[in-house]
Amino acid sequence: MAKAVKKKTALPTKKQTADIDAKRSKAYGDMEPHLCDVVRMGEIAASLFDCSDQGLFVFAVGHLEQMLLELRKRYYAEEFPI
């Protein structure tokens, strides 16, 4: 039985690697304020857990969910080669 031929993939050059690293660094840096907003919203929602106005808690958790979904979209929006 014949062995499957493995296709060789070229390794990225130092310049390509540096460009990818710079792009990733910028992308993660750009996400920082959004991540901080999500964390703060989580803190607000947690502080409202025992609030007498449960509608306010439900609103905060719902808003947190929307913020998390948006953060996930931002995170996966950029494709980076491995």
Image (tube, rainbow, N blue to C red):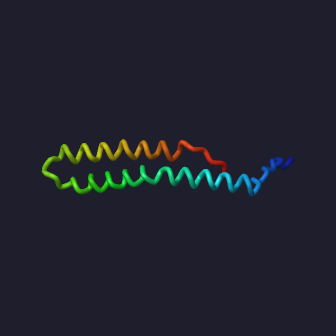
Give the quarter of the image for residue 50: bottom left
| Residue 81 location (% of width, % of height) | 66, 48
Q: Relative to 1, is 31 on the left or the right?
A: left
Residue at 27 percent across and 54 percent down: it is 44
Q: Relative to 19, is 1 on the left or the right?
A: right
Q: Relative to 64, is 70 on the left or the right?
A: right
Residue at 36 percent across and 42 percent down: it is 66
Judging depth in this view, the residue of 8 and 13 nearest the camera is 13
| Residue 67 location (% of width, % of height) | 38, 45
| Residue 48 location (% of width, % of height) | 21, 53
The residue positioned farthest toward the left in the image shown:
52
The residue positioned farthest toward the right in the image shown:
2
Count every numbered label the image shows and give the total. Answer: 0
| Residue 38 location (% of width, % of height) | 37, 51
Judging depth in this view, the residue of 25 and 61 nearest the camera is 25
Q: Relative to 69, is 26 on the left or the right?
A: right
Residue at 23 percent across and 56 percent down: it is 47
